[in-house]
Structure formats: C-alpha cells, structure tokens
Amino acid sequence: MAERLSPEQDSATLIDHFERPRNAGAMPDADAEAFVTNPVCGDSLRIFLRFVDGRVAAASFLSSGCPASIATSSAATEMVTGRTPEEAEAFTRDDYAAAVDGLPASKVHCSVLAASAVRQAVAAWRMKQAAHA
Ligand code: FES
C-alpha cells in the first residue's frame, strides 16, 4: 500500500499516476514543446508533442512538480494522444483533474500546468506549421 503523500485524501488513480507516470521523459524528435511554471509554488512542467497526419501521435513530459501536477501531466499525455490539435487544446484543468479522480482541495490549481503546457505546445506547433507553409 502506498504511503500517504499528504494529510489530504489523494485518489488511488492520482497515486498510481504519480508512482508510475505514463510517458515520462524527454522526446528528442518532438515537433513542439512548451515549458510552464507556476509562479506561486515554482513547480514546472515541460511537455513534448509529436504530430502525425494532423494528430498528436505521442506526448511526453518532464516535471519538477508536486505529486498532483505529475499525476495530471501523466494523465494529460494519455488524453491528448490520438487527438487533433483542437481536441487537445480543448481539454481543461478540470478534465485533467477528473482523469485522476479529482484533486484534494489545496491541489486543485496543480492541473493548470498540464492544461497550459498542452495549449502552448499546440500553439508552438501551429506557428511552426505556419512558418513552413
Ligand atoms: Fe505547485 Fe502543485 S503545488 S503545481
């Protein structure tokens, strides 16, 4: 059984994503990436996206964040894979929080990193596409 990460109740899904993050690591052949930092706590996230035929073919992340931000980033990489850019950027922080069965009250803000990073990476990909058009 996992040790409690905090006095608040973390869901089993959150703990699972934190302990076994999906798609963790850099992506050398990424088509786009974004780096975001939470100015309040200083936690940061770098997300990488690779696109094939106008869809996210793969996503990965590097984090120096809290367990909630790692878990929601892990979930985000799974959720955006296979999606169009429009679908990927439409996911909200609430969608990522829901994907880990909710966040403790004091950690609700932590899913902002994933939502911001995905949107910025999609925007970076669009700019790259436009530059090559
Ligand atoms: Fe900073 Fe969670 S405490 S993102």
Image (cartoon, rainbow, N blue to C red):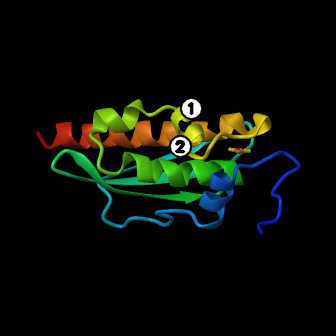
Q: Position of residue 20 (x, y in %)?
A: 59, 67
What's the distance in space between the residues labelled 2 and 1, CA to CA?
11 Å
Query: Residue 90, relative to residue 18: is it above or below?
Result: above
Residue pictured at 51% horizontal, 51% vertical: 75
Query: Residue 43, relative to residue 28: is it above or below?
Result: above
Residue pictured at 57% horizontal, 38% vertical: 98
Figure label count: 2
- Report the amino acid beneath label 1: Asp
Labels 2, 1: front one: 1
Residue pictured at 43% horizontal, 53% vertical: 78
Residue 28 lies in what quarter of the image?
Answer: bottom left
Residue tagged by mark 2?
Answer: 114
Residue tagged by mark 1?
Answer: 94
Query: Residue 122, relative to residue 27: is it above or below?
Result: above
Badge 2 local density, few (<14 within 10 Å), some, or many (20+)? many
Ligand 1 positioned in quadrant: top right
Viewer-proximal residue among 18 and 133: 18
- Residue found at the far left of this picture: 133
Tell me, yes or no, if residue 65 can be seen here. no
Residue pictured at 54% horizontal, 40% vertical: 96
